[in-house]
Image: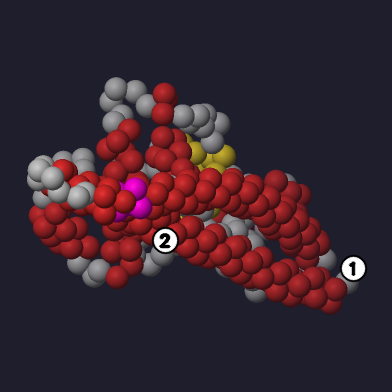
Amino acid sequence: MDTRAAKVEQVVFDFLRPKLKQYREQATDLKRAAASSVSKVAAHADAVVAQRRRELKKAQDELEACQAQEGADCSGYARQVRICEQKLADALRGRAMIQEASSRFSKLQSKHTAEVDQLLLRAEKMVRQADERTIRYQKSSQYVPHATMLRSTPLGGRGNLTSTGSLIGTSSSDAPTGRARTDSDTPASSEATLWTDFPGVSVPPHFPDGFALVPVALIENENPVTGPQEFDAGQSLPVLRWATDALLDVVLPAMDRMPDLQNYLSGRDAQEGLSGDRSYTATYRGFFSPDAAIKVSPTRDGFNLSNGRHRLWLLQRAGVDAVPVRIIGDGQ
């Protein structure tokens, strides 16, 4: 391989990366659209059942009123009750079919999503590994590009991890005093990777410093929650479920569009009579304060979960693909 071939390979990697990210985003959008459609159908089925119950109750009340009148012919009212009972039975049967189909669809969709995630992760890892090999070749051949797919700074830049996605690794200033760093001074394992370059990771402009949206598929959890039985007395499952919904339905959308977020959340709390743990302000603090946030630390291939396994489980159950986390480094 000559330097011209290395340049061509780099262009290919830079082309493939956004394409893989675009496919992941399209798959996520499709999943959300399908979930929204399923939810609307289920809500309509519930509304029809509720309406049929009201119609039956009305027909039953009218029949009872007729029967209270001596000598009254109530056959018409009785027939109406039977019609309403049949309509309610049909509505309940239809809702049960919708629920069964939704459950079956959800399982198949989850399986498909997991398979797509695994395929994308393997593809992205292959691109990243190929890119690293190209970087090593470029270094050994004395060809040093201005920037690479894995770096937003020139080779040899300082490599300490920061909340804004700085490099993990070493810098040329770490070489022994009095001589320039050589290739033998830098082991292959010190190849630096931006955690912001991992597939699907984003840093929304409205997030606090040090926070990011990280795909669940990239988070390594050595002690995953297996079910509600793992919540102890100090962790109210209903409250945490409420906070999870509040985060997804109110807090995150508000962060994206409300310039004065704190006043907006406290105003919503006052308007809806919310306080304590069941409030939007408490939800924001729980997910975005440095101490209470879900914390992860970058690794070579993703992130290790340091704190927040219960909330991660609840967010996964809610069907999210990426979760808000605080990025921490070794020893933080």
Q: Which residues are magenta?
A: 80-84
- The residue depicted at 20 percent of the width and 67 percent of the height is 260
Q: Position of residue 14 (x, y in %)?
A: 69, 71
The residue under label 2 is 40
Earlier along the polypeptide chain: callout 1 or callout 2? 1
Q: Is residue 81 magenta?
A: yes
The circle on residue 121 is none
Please name the residue shown 41% across and 24% down the image.
229
- The kind of residue tagged 1 is Met
Tell me the quadrant of the picture where the C terminus can be found: top left
- Residue 152, picture quadrant: bottom right
Element class at badge 1: loop
Considering the image in quadrants, where does the N terminus appear? bottom right
Which residue is the site of mark 1? 1
Q: CA distance from mark 1 to mark 2?
A: 56 Å
Q: Position of residue 32 (x, y in %)?
A: 49, 61
Instruction: Judge left or right: residue 94 versus residue 77.
Output: right
Compared to residue 275, the image places residue 266 above or below, namely below
Local SS, label 2: helix
Q: Amino acid at mark 2?
A: Lys
Q: Is residue 149 at all visible to an observer of this figure?
A: no
The image position of residue 114, as x and y in percent, is: 63, 48
Whether 185 is among the magenta residues is: no
Question: Which residue is found at the position 67% from the left and 55% from the top?
Answer: 116
